[in-house]
């Protein structure tokens, strides 16, 4: 589930950046993408918080963005 959220965040981010470059930062769809990304980040943070309370010794996930590739560790 977490990997799906991270993938969706990255896909929305790429769409948002592409649209912002084409149409400008003030385009309504750019704001819509940003809001969707924020909502997914909130879900991810809640999931990580719940996980940290259940499994306190578990290492946190890391998410790396390098150019146009996303890496999960």
Image (cartoon, helix red, strand yellow):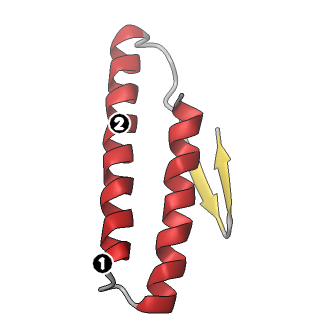
Query: Residue 31's x, y, as percent?
Result: 30, 71
Mark 2 vs 1: CB contact within 8 A: no
Q: Residue at x 47, y 71 (%)?
A: 16
* Residue beneath disc 2: 43
The quadrant of the rendering that contains the C terminus is top right
* Residue beneath disc 1: 28
Q: Give the camera-side residue of 49 and 9.
A: 9
Q: Quadrant of residue 48?
A: top left
Query: Residue 54's x, y, as percent?
Result: 38, 9
Q: Give the camera-side residue of 16 and 73.
A: 16
Q: Quadrant of residue 24?
A: bottom left
Label 1 packing within 10 angstroms: few (<14), some (14-19), many (20+): few
Q: CA distance from mark 2 to mark 1?
A: 23 Å
Q: Residue furthest front?
A: 29
Q: Give the camera-side residue of 7 and 48.
A: 7
Q: Horizontal placement of 60 versus 41: left or right?
A: right
């Amino acid at each position: 589930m977490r990997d799906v959220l991270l993938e969706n965040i990255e896909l929305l981010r790429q769409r948002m950046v592409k649209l912002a470059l084409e149409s400008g930062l003030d385009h309504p769809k750019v704001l819509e993408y940003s809001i969707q990304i924020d909502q997914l980040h909130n879900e991810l943070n809640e999931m990580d918080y719940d996980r940290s309370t259940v499994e306190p010794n578990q290492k946190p996930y890391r998410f790396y963005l390098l150019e146009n590739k996303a890496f999960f560790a």
